[in-house]
Image (tube, helix red, strand yellow):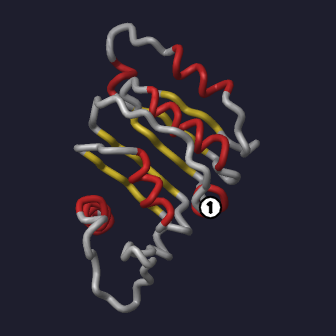
Amino acid sequence: MYAMFRLEQFIMSNFYHSLLTDPEINFYNRGSPIFRDLINLQLSMFYFHHWDHVMEVLQHCPKLQILLILKLSEDKINWKYPNFVPECISSHLISCTINYEGLEDELQFAKYILQNARLLGVMQITGTFLFKQKPSLQPLQELYSCPRISSECKLSIG
């Protein structure tokens, strides 16, 4: 698990730079690597900038099945659904965990996954927000009524 953690940190901290020189890795014209065999990814982001960056990472992990997003930021970010669905979301993603800090963009991203991940079995929402005194859980209730493309998907909040 430690080696995976190191790789994930490396990807996020240097994603827009020339990452690797290994000729075995395919590159898009922009120079971003494709991680063809990556199936389990934990994104731990202490200085979260934008959900679009997460979407770009997902585009480069076509076989990804398990996604865990831990973002520690309380900045409001207006995120709109993209006009595309990465292959990993539409065809391979079976589990997604997102830490929720009470922000609208986090809910929007969770809804996007629920509406586009055909094989999703588990969507788990966690976070310190859930343990604050008397948090408003109304926004999270929206997830229960959100249409899901996967009839097998179980939503877990807590």
- What residue is shown at x 52% (from left), y 63% (from top)? 64
**The residue tagged with tag 1: helix, strand or loop?**
loop
Quarter occupied by residue 129:
top left
In the image, residue 89 lies at what x, y percent? 59, 56
Q: Assign the N terminus to one quadrant of the image.
A: bottom left
**Residue 78 spot, x, y in % from top left:** 43, 33
Q: Which residue is at a point 65% across and 57% down the rendered structure image?
A: 90
Total count of labels: 1
Quickly name the residue at label 1. Answer: 92
- Residue found at the far top of this picture: 134
Q: Is 59 left, or right, of 115 in this rendering? A: left
Above or below — where is 23 with respect to 118? Answer: below
Residue furthest to the bottom in view is: 23
Q: Is residue 78 left or right of residue 44?
A: right
Q: Position of residue 130 (x, y in %)?
A: 39, 21
Q: Few, some or many C-alpha atoms within 10 Å of disc 1 (few <14, some 14-19, many ≥20)?
A: some
Which is nearer the eye, 125 or 104?
Answer: 104
Residue at 61% x, 63% y is 87
Where residue 23 appears, x then y in whole percent? Answer: 36, 92
Say above or below: 108 vs 85: above
What amino acid is at disc 1?
Answer: His
Name the outermost residue toward the right.
151
Q: Quadrant of residue 91?
A: bottom right
Left or right, 150 with reference to 135? right
Closer-to-camera residue (103/127)? 103
Relative to 25, 9 lies left or right:
left
Q: Residue visible at 40% across and 46% down?
A: 69
Say which quarter of the image contains residue 10: bottom left
